[in-house]
Amino acid sequence: MTVNDWSSAKNRLRGATWLSRLRLNATRSHAADPHATDPHVTGPKARDSNIISPSAIRPRAIWMVAFLGLVPAACGAQLSQNAPAQPAASPQLSQAAGQSSFDGLIQLAAADQVAEAPAGGTEPPPISSPYGAYLAGIVAANNRDYSVAAEYMLHALRADPENLELAETVFMLVSADGRREDSVELAQQLLAKHPDFALATVILAVDAAEQEDWEKADEILAGLPDQGLSSLLSPLLRGWIDVAKGDADGAMDRIASLQKTSGFGMLYDLHYAVMNDVAGRVDLARTGYDRALGTGAAATLRLSWLSGNFFERQGDNQKAGEIYGRFLANANGSTLMEPLLERSQRMGEDVTPAVASAKEGLAEVLFNIASLLSQERATDLALIYVRQALILRPDFDMAQVLLGEIMESQGRGREALAAYQDLSDESPFSWMVGLRIADQLQDLDQTDNALVELDRLAAERPDHYEPLFRKGNLLRSQERFTEAIDAYNEAAERLEELAPRYWSLLYFRGIAFERSDQWARAEEDFLRALDLEPDQPFVMNYLAYSWVEQNVHLDRAEEMLIRAVELRPDDGYIVDSLGWAYYRLGDYESAVHYLEKAVELRPQDSVINDHLGDAYWQTDRRMEARFQWRRALSLDPEDDQVPLIEEKLDKGLELAPKNI
């Protein structure tokens, strides 16, 4: 897919309006690139704000997601007529259900993520009251414990089976939870009432296709409305059914409309190629793959995988190797394609088709949609689609990995771990997924198990530094600094040279040195990291702040911090460092200016409030100074800082800093 194609497709998703706004927006970010960020910097001198916290703020909220074409336009009136007094219908749902149409191919309504990982696997305690079950279901859904939420909501629905709004909510829950039988049963009920309910249509079509009842699947899909996401789904899904029925020409006619639709050229080229490949039309498949690869943009993982697989099977190992090699060169450290590149270089090996049947082609469509939705943080809906892909193709490794990624992005650590652990050890993704398993174990406070997993991965691939790098980060997060240094040293030994993208290895090792009172070695690593990545704001901040604390190199520290603030003006820790440097230099007015801004950016940080109190004192704002010190004491300062702050509250600051 070209850059413009992706941009257009994403803009269509971003143009979405919400169907229901029961939940507040929230996101969970896990650093995908360990060379760029790290979520486990710890300690009082961890001044790099955006890499301290392992996750963003994730307020609790109730689950509900839908999009144009998947919610019937007539539903609003029907629901308002049938809504019982108890359980009470949500007014947001009732209002939104009556919305009819929006411009664009994809109009998506999606509530994003919630906060904490649910316990997972818990049996819901019995509740006799349907209304109580409804409320308990809301609480469980709020915690993204879909299994428990579905049980409670099903209980409520059995007491009020004509409540279509409740049935729709339960349908979404059981579909997201992967409960196929319940999902199919509810889809049948909902579709009988509203034939234009597209998501129910897709669920029933997948059920028929899984049983290879192609006529029934096609008949069901014929009911998809020609609007919204259905205008993309219908030609692709029905095109693959044409392939299953032996009508490859019909499939080409079916998907031809996508070629003219801005934003979906890549999907057209990809499925044109794979459909012809499965149908045995090699020349047309080759044309499709060449066209998809020839857009000028870097090929995606899936395109590289499918096209390389095709050319290997045609005996063109050189071209396959070039495709795999280009992906590796552009993937910044990804190792996924290495086994495929090595296989292409050995020549003569039997290669199994990456997509071997029409059923697997249908799974490919659903996986593509789930991937796009996941990228746009419509993860609840993406979860439903990826589960449908896995129904059609249970051994679909990429879909299984995506399932884990979605769980992880939603803060559902235990379920993400289970999804990753379900991947076969024989999968080419198993080593990469092992790194994610270690991350999840760490997030679940299973440090010893995480270390065992990282050691296993390091032994399995002795030429890769990544497991040892992550081991160092984990140990550092536990304040086991000496052990962290050993792990970083081992990681560095595996690198032929320290390329610029490895600046973070030196940076994090430098932090471990500094925290273990080995400042000379820490300073050396920070300076070497800046040689690799000049103007790196986190490194400049940590180094310059350390100099300020030691009252050395203050002029150079000031220069570094001014530059760091220019690069990250909204980072409270970096702004605080500059303010504290001015304090050390005796420029108290400038210190107050930056420290006040730092407190605005990080109002809950004890150190920053303490710094501002000191600056206020030196500018004769004594009452404000004492207020800030009291506030600093209330914000859980480090134990060794408590008596120092208390002494300032008692006696004030008698002397200016010694270097002034």
Image (cartoon, helix red, strand yellow):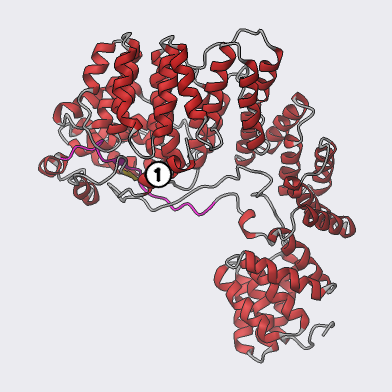
Image quarter hosting the C terminus: bottom right
For this view, does 608 lie left or right of residue 499?
Answer: left
Task: Point out the residue furthest to the left here.
Answer: 81
Q: Quadrant of residue 484?
A: top right
User: Closest to the observer: 234 or 376?
Assistant: 234
Magenta part of the protein: which range?
56-73
Residue that mark 1 sits on: 8
Looking at the image, is 171 positioned above or below residue 277?
A: below
Residue 126 lies within the magenta run: no
Residue 69 lies within the magenta run: yes
Number of other residues with Cα within 10 Å of mark 1, as a class: few under 14, some 14 to 19, many 20 or more = some
Q: What residue type is disc 1 on? A: Ser
Q: Quadrant of residue 430?
A: top right
Q: Quadrant of residue 214?
A: top left
For this view, does 206 lie left or right of residue 644?
Answer: left
For this view, does 301 lie left or right of residue 332?
Answer: left
